[in-house]
Image: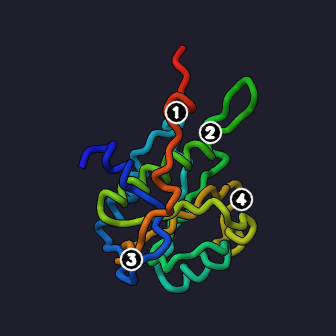
Amino acid sequence: MDFLELAETRYSVRKFSPHPVEREKLEAILRAGQVSPTACNNQPQRVLVAQSPEALERVRRCSVHHFGETLALLVCFDKTECWTRDYDGSPSGEVDASIVTTHMMLAAWELGIGSTWVMHFIPEAVRVEFSLPEGWEPVALLLMGYPAQDAAPSPLHSRKKPLEETVTYL
């Protein structure tokens, strides 16, 4: 499938099958995150892989959003390793981690693995549950797994604003 078809068909899966993601597919997804562009190629992302029942239970204590996932990637960035703009001190870490998350999400879909990007989590709970080092900032929980047979996109999924509303030609 070409990229636009991949991007158009991918949706937030909110019901997963119990079938676990195979190691080689997980490695391919993580590789997609590794090759993602980051500011000055500093690669400040830190990805925690939760797939054991115990680790997934820890994820569940950090957010109210769960869909029977068999895998969760907690995407963070290390504040000490991200590029910072000189003129205003704005760090690139959140953007870098978001790009990494997007690459992994799309790579997963290409492999038949669904995901839901959860930003609604409790950062302090994540820090405690996963003993995050000082300076690591959690950005996203990427809940993943094979879509259940009756999984379907949200009714809002295909609703897109016209380009004229979101793009300005200069």
Look at label 3 and name its amino acid.
Asp
CB-based contact (under 8 Å), mark 1 and mark 3: no
Nearer to us of marks 3 and 4 is: 3
Nearer to us in this view, 163 or 22: 163
Residue matched to label 3: 150
- Local secondary structure at mark 4: loop
- At a point 29% along the width and 62% down the height, the residue shown is 111
Q: Picture coordinates of residue 5 (x, y %)?
A: 31, 47
- First-in-chain label (4 vs 2): 2
Residue at label 1?
40
- In this view, the residue in front, 134 or 139, is 139
Q: Residues within 10 Å of mark 2 (few under 14, many from 20)?
A: many
Disc nearest the viewer among 3 and 2: 3
Q: Residues within 10 Å of mark 3 (few under 14, many from 20)?
A: few
Q: Quadrant of the C terminus?
A: top right
Q: Position of residue 163 (x, y in %)?
A: 49, 32
Give amino acid for label 1.
Cys
